[in-house]
Amino acid sequence: MLNLRLIEMFLIQLIIYLTLWFINEYVAFLLSSIFAVILLAVLIISGIAELIDRSKVSKRYFLMMILSVLAPICSGAIYLILTGSKLDFSFGI
């Protein structure tokens, strides 16, 4: 298995999310929102579980989870800054 550093894994996620944003911003918005919320929930639950009962989970797991929550948010912000889009999903209604 590849031994990637945290910053490399974050940049890979950022590139994937940004590619999705440039292909279809509606789908990217939905997926980014869903993934960010789910990963944040997993991070909170695992943090609470770690506080209750210490385990042998490394600090790297928590750092990776934080970066995984930040990647879709950062990619959306970068896309909005670069394109100046206002995310209008009214579809002509």
Image (cartoon, grey):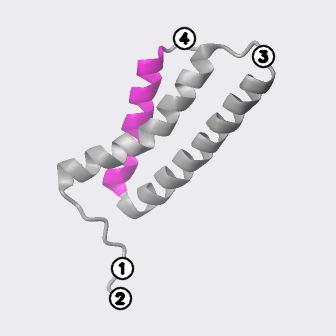
Who comes first in sequence, dot 1 or dot 4? 4
Who comes first in sequence, dot 2 or dot 4? 4
Q: What segment carries the magenta color?
A: 5-23
Image quadrant where one finds the N terminus: top right
Q: Which residue is the extreme one toward the bottom?
A: 93
- Residue type at numbered disc 4: Asn
Which one is nearer the viewer's eye here, 65 or 7?
A: 65
The percent position of residue 83, horizontal first and vertical second, equals 19, 54
* Cα distance in 3D space between marks 2 and 3: 52 Å
Residue located beneath label 1 in the image: 90
Q: Residue at x 27, y 49 (%)?
A: 79
Neighbourhood count class around disc 4 (C-alpha, 10 Å): few under 14, some 14–19, many 20 upward: few
In screen coordinates, is 70 left or right of 57?
left
* Cα distance in 3D space between marks 3 and 1: 47 Å
Residue located beneath label 4 in the image: 3
Residue located beneath label 3 in the image: 55
The percent position of residue 33, horizontal first and vertical second, equals 49, 54
Who comes first in sequence, dot 4 or dot 3? 4
